Amino acid sequence: MSEFAIGVIVTVGLLVMVFMGVRVYAAAAMAGLVGMVWLIGWDAGAGIVGTIPHSKSVNYVLSVLPMFILIGFIAYHAGLTHALFDAAKAWFGWVPGGLAVASVFATAGFAAVSGASTATAAVFSRVAIPHMLDHGYSPKLAAGVVAAGGTLASLIPPSAILVIYAIIVEESVGTLILAGFVPGVISAVIYAMLIIGQCAIKPELGRAIPFPPLGEALRTLPGTTPIFAVVAIIFSAMYAGWATPTEAGALGAFVVLVIALWRGMRWNALQNALMETAKLSVMIFALIWGVLIFVRFLGFAGLPEAFAEWIVNLPLEPVLIMVGILLGYAVLGMFMDAIGMLLLTLPVVYPAVIALGYDPIWFGIIVVKMCEVCLITPPVGLNCYVVSAVRPDIPLGDVFRGIFPFFLMDAVTVGLFLAYPEIVLWLPNLVNS
Amino acid sequence: MLRSVDGLFFKLEKFLNLIAALVILGVMLVGVSQVVGRKLADFLGDVFDKNVPDALSWIGPVPGYVDIIEMVMTIFAFIAIAYCQRLGGHVRMEIILGRLKGRVLYGLEIFGTLVALAVVLILMYFAYQHFGRAWEIGDSTIDIELPIWPSKLLVPFAFLILAIRLSLNLAGFIRLFLNPDGDEIAVPHIESVDEQAQHEIDAGLAGEEEKIDLLNRDKGGNS
């Protein structure tokens, strides 16, 4: 049997295992192991596979992951959510739909640091929605804003998922972290413009609140410094290269930890945050080595090259193929966790995308944006579900109706990046040149 | 019997996870001293025009920083793997499993656990061989020449713990397969959307005073 045929059979086997609910790390490792043994025999095949977990995990670059995750778990204890919302309210409240605009920026800012979209939506349902409802805002708008704002988590630095993308496709971690910044901010601004537009046309959705006295507005700023400090440390370290991602992540985590301890975080809470960090880290490491075992086999079987060649020779415009790939991710994302989905698909999809002439950095940003959009689409749309769970007075249907315009705006944003890749690539190119 | 073995073993898994957690905290502290030390050393070098007095000469980046991090990484990359399995933390697709009940569900769970157990046992054997080679050659890291074998030995050790955990899961699923109406013991539990939401809410509101309870956990509900 040809190597290619073995590649196809084993890949189908992997997909069957995944759909049957085998944990992805085990399914990928098993598929890779079986494939390698089939291709080059028991001793050589299994021998190579046996070295992969250690050799692929012990890589300094990967040590940034627990740092970014730790920042996220500690951030909830640093009293940042209320501080951020108060500051955003003071500075952005005066525009039409001002409280909703403030919520978008506060949620996006916190999500960036926490890295967790859904948990951020949960806490801002508590922090921001009551203020909006008190000021007579439409409950649908209020809920939609919070559920959508959380999805900006994985573009603005620090972002663990962009690091994982970089590792799987062997691109620079620093470049990807940097590249997420502008698209993340643009996504937030587009959300804000949507709200301003809606509320300018229909003021009853949400009215502006007056700008507070300048002194009062200025006093809201110090509480938000940890957020800006973390983003600035990581952003500037990647931009100017004064620290590695791990060092910058360590410094960011340290800053947040000091603030959290100063705000009264106890050992119990710290221990919980650390335990959760360790659990999430080991899950990601297991996925990485499991999938890399499979990737090693794919390389032997020549499958990615064959798939790339097939894609390139399709009688279709590359842009149509790209739209097809993105729609595929949108569908898959409804059923699967973003990290698992990326790791499982990228080894085959990525070489094809590159063969089509797309930029690796650009594709990373687009694909991560797609993963986030999946958090606000039915059937589950966990972000929407969580908002409705924290605010039982806003039914799930209303949250979905409230978020629909944001979903449309996300489609516009992805289209924008598709049409003008330079928006995504401008900043990383500036640094690399 | 299974319940108490499961509980006892979970204590060990928790302990290993705690070690991984503390190592992560350590990596953070070492990283901070690395950056601060390097920046301070640069600064002192400028101030004293390269003639830093002996009393301050110890200030600088951590010697062998990358070696140290790579050496301890195996700890948080592997030893909590069984803890994560116990809590059902490893990613999988539950689109089909989530709709099944009873024997069909437990049958598939047995299949999934067997796949994981088989691959982990094979990997354990070959990862141990990988350690054996490093032990014989006396392999060491590039910069400060730390021996590599301890970090390589941790991998088969973690796989051994995971294999024991998977065997416990297997026993639990077989028990349920035989008696689908029994209690769920020693098996990771498939979370409903409510339970997933509850997790996210717990995480999100970790710093808030007032909590939210979707599952009525205080009233002895599903936990």
Image (tube, rainbow, N blue to C red):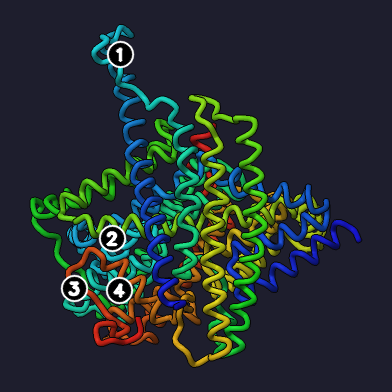
Nearest-to-viewer mark from 2 and 1: 1
Could you tell me residue A141's position as x and y percent? 32, 77
The residue labelled by disc 4 is A199
| Nearer the camera: disc 2 or disc 4 | 2
Instruction: Locate the N terminus of chain B and report the quarter of the image it occupies.
Output: bottom left
Taking the image as shown, residue A389 lies to the left or right of residue B136, namely left
Marks 1 and 3: which is nearer the front? 3
- Disc 1 is attached to a residue of which chain? B
Question: Callout 1 environment at 10 Å: few (<14), some (14 to 19), or many (20+)?
Answer: few
Between the residue at mark 2 and the residue at mark 4, the CA separation in whole angstroms equals 19 Å
Which secondary structure, mark 2? helix
Q: Is residue B177 left or right of residue A39?
A: left
Res. A205 in view: yes
Residue type, mark 4 in image: Cys
Which one is in front in this view, the residue at disc 2 or the one at disc 3? 3
Q: Chain of mark 2?
A: A
**Residue found at x 34% / y 48%:** B22
Instruction: List the residue tagged with mark 2.
Output: A106
Residue where numbered disc 1 is placed: B46
Q: Identify the element where label 3 is drawn.
A: loop
Q: What amino acid is labelled 3 in the image?
A: Glu
Same-chain check, marks 1 and 3: yes
